[in-house]
Amino acid sequence: MSEPLRLSKLMSERGLCSRREADDLIAKGLVKVDGEIVSQLGTKVLPSVRIEITGRAQRMLDEKVTILINKPVGYVSSQPEGGYRAAVELVRPENQDAGDKKKFDRAHLKKLAPCGRLDIDSQGLLIMSQDGVLAKKIIGEDSDVEKEYLVRVTGRLSEQDLKRLCNGSLVIEGRKLRPAKVEWLNEDQLRFVLREGMKRQIRKMCEAVGLKVMGLKRVRIGRLMLGKLAEGQWRYLRKGEEI
């Protein structure tokens, strides 16, 4: 017989919302299990139960926003330290993409969290979201979402070392990396496609094969492209767009 699970964990596994969002909805009395409201945090249920969220709960989840930012060099993607600026500071009306039709609301800044890191020396696509399910899809332990980067480098790269970048044989800080797609675009620029997001991973991969990164730009996360979004500008995720 299956062991009972925390209701919030089961809701997350079923893709209804994140565990944190589930706890919030449960506490508000907006979740039904087999037709009965459950409002006690920590409640455990069998994996076979029927879970429903109320109309109000669904509206609360639907109101959550996701924002795409073209982060410039010099901004950090999460909490700033030592006087650095956070990328979320760019989310202001004057920086909104001119083609964006959704009106900016300061409430959209509440609980807006980065879905993955992009270090201070890198630029390009950064996704920030209030949606826990979307965040988990991008940065969860089992995430298989591709991230694409254009990387300017100096140094010599042998065919053997290019294969090492691709085949998952590199070990960085005791961790074996997943296989990646790496190819030359021109004489000093490589294209990387990764399915993981270790801190400063590309820089460390390049260092391991004798290359030095001179510039790094993320241009795609899943099916979301940076496109023509100008540096320092942002826009809302549009209806119908998916990771």
Image: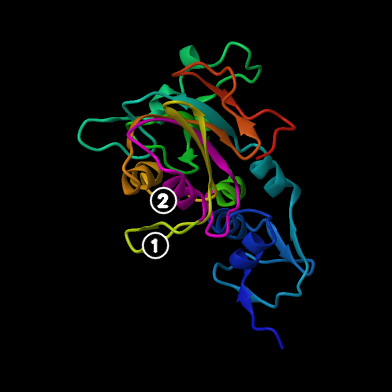
User: Which residue appears at 60% of the width and 64% of the height?
Assistant: 8
* Element under disc 1: strand
Q: In this picture, which residue range is highlighted in magenta?
A: 139-167
Badge 2 is on which residue?
Answer: 198
- Residue 167 placed where, x, y %? 52, 55
Amino acid type, mark 1: Arg
**Disc 1: CA contacts within 10 A as few (<14), some (14-19) or many (>=20):** few
User: Which residue appears at 31% of the width and 44% of the height?
Assistant: 207
Amino acid type, mark 2: Met
In the rendered structure, the answer to whether residue 205 lies left or right of residue 70 reads left
Looking at the rendered image, the disc whose residue lies closer to the viewer, 2 or 1, is: 1
CA separation in Å, label 2 and label 1: 10 Å
The extreme bottom residue here reads 1
Badge 1 is on which residue?
Answer: 175
User: Which residue appears at 41% of the width and 51% of the height?
Assistant: 198
Lower sequence index among marks 2 and 1: 1
- Residue 219 placed where, x, y %? 53, 30
- State yes or no: residue 188 in magenta: no
- Quarter of the figure that contains the N terminus: bottom right
Q: Does residue 9 show up?
A: yes
Observer-nearest of 118 and 217: 217
User: Which residue appears at 68% of the width and 28% of the height?
Assistant: 238
